Image (tube, coloured by chain):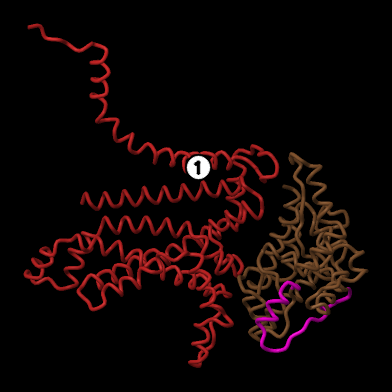
Amino acid sequence: MAWQDVTSAYRWMWFLFQHGGQLLNDDLTGPQIDNAAGVETIAFNKSWFEENLVPPSTSIKSVQTIESLFAAGTTAMMLNGEWLIPFLETGMTAGWDVTYMIRDENMASDMGGNAVAITKDSKNPELAADFLKHLASEEEMKRFCLEGLFLPTRKALVEQGMEYSTYPERLNLFVEQSTTVPAKMAAEQTAPLSPLFTQVLGNELEQAFKIGQSAEETARRISEGIEKVYEQ
Amino acid sequence: MAVQQAPKVRQTEQSWWARNQRRLTPYIFIAPNMLVFTVFLFVPMVFAIYMSLNEWSLIEAPTFIGLGNYVAMAQDPQFWQSLWNTLLYTAGTVPTSIVIGLVVAIGLNRKLPARGLLRSIFFVPVVISMVAVALVGAWIFDDSYGVINNGLTALGFDPVPWLSSQRWAMVTLVVATLWVRIGFNMVVYLAALQGIPPEVYEAAHIDGATGWNRFWNITRPLLGPTTFLLVILNVIYSIHVFDLIYVMTAGGPGFSTTVLVMYVYQAAFENLQMGYASAMGVVLFALLLAFTAFQWRITRQSEGV
């Protein structure tokens, strides 16, 4: 699983949402992970390391490149993004392909992407806003995604279908998968304090995966860590 | 014939400069360096001390909280763990690299075939970027496809989780560091060894001193100032380590290789706690200052004896 390093620990969240859980409460003012769904999800991922189902070097705090393990045949499957398709095309000697994400009670997938924003002290906020509107417009997003092999975030583009010139079938599978990103998860991952939550999540999941911290204690400590972030 | 005298004003200016030139010239020479030091070291240091008394997320204006950051630090188990890891890393790298560097220097101070080539081989790692060293180190020590584990497997041994186990990760980092540090220490010791008059060794040899006696009673004491300098430099380098660990282990597994500077970086640029990070930076500075003063005192006492 490509959740290296701590700053990418938010990618664990879709496991939680697949299992019917969530990291924050409904109004995004506090944690909601210290419950059965949270504990069971942590235990599930923790078992990967306990049962040697994944290489020990693929925990959160690692510099391991998952695609290298996959390309070398060390792992039979990897949960990773579409941007690696060109690498695998050139690097893989054995056959490989793309398929749907694993699923639990629900389907969910990593949102990913990069955010753009205007600071409140911007000297030209209107101009900056126009630029952001241009970036997010249907026409520009379509051009950007088709040329850069990215996935669109506009539902209209997803419904129209993306006519990728290279790897069209594989990329459209990713597009189809992207519709399973839970809206609540997207809201949590774009909350103003989300980088701080991610730090807490990454540190505690690392303790669970590599140091033997129990799933119950991990869920509790993640909850306490998020509460502390809100108090600050 | 009347003697002409120079005007009194000109005499006063010349005599003032003549009086003060000798005293002021050194300051004029060091002024550029002092300016750079002030702008890029002293001012940021003072600013860091001021920031350590504030809560500042970079996005909003700082809020004065007094010693709040220091109180939080004292109660933060991750701070103490990162401090412990720093001391562990320092204890593993400093004496080892100095001893091995000295041994190599003594060996390469003799007349050997290909001596120049051997010296170069030891010194080349010093000029390589630490990030490059860390990247290569991460590949060499990789659990799955690293050269070392492939070699161990080929010889019938089990692979070792060099970077993914708490037990081995710090050891691996120390080994990677030694590869760089030994060369640096060797070069400094080589220069110092070549400054010891050979007659001293000849006289000792005539008096029947063994090789070990010559080393312990001549080489070691005469290398005292060099050793003092290398201990300080190596301790500073070790306490400041960041790039090697960031690239090779990212501070993991768990917090087993998270050192103080890495924790400062995480606090500042990942947790957006500039005030807290500044407080830890101040503590780091105080530790180094205390160590340097202690080392200086020990050396002066031993010289006095």
Q: Nearer the viewer, residue B277 or A66?
A: A66
Q: Amino acid at mark 1?
A: Met
Which chain does brown denote in the image?
A: A
The vertical placement of B151 against B94, above or below, is below
Q: In the figure, is residue B135 to the left or right of A27?
A: left
Query: Which shade is chain B?
Result: red
Q: Is residue B24 magenta?
A: no
Question: Looking at the image, which residue is at 87% across and 73% down?
Answer: A176
Dot 1: chain letter: B
Residue A122 occupies which quadrant of the picture? Answer: top right
Measured as percent of width and height from the top left, residue B260 is found at 53, 57
Left or right: B11 in relation to B180 = left
At x 70%, y 68%, the residue is A205
What is the span of residues highlighted in magenta in the rendered image?
Answer: A81-106
Image height of B24 relative to A58, above or below: above
Our reading of the magenta stretch's main secondary structure is loop
Q: Nearer the viewer, residue B219 or B78?
A: B219
Q: Position of residue B198 (x, y in %)?
A: 13, 65
Q: Secondary structure at mark 1?
A: helix
Which class describes the residues within 10 Å of circle 1: few (<14), some (14-19), or many (20+)? some
Q: Which residue is mark 1?
A: B45
The quadrant in which residue B197 appears is bottom left
Relative to A199, B45 lies left or right: left
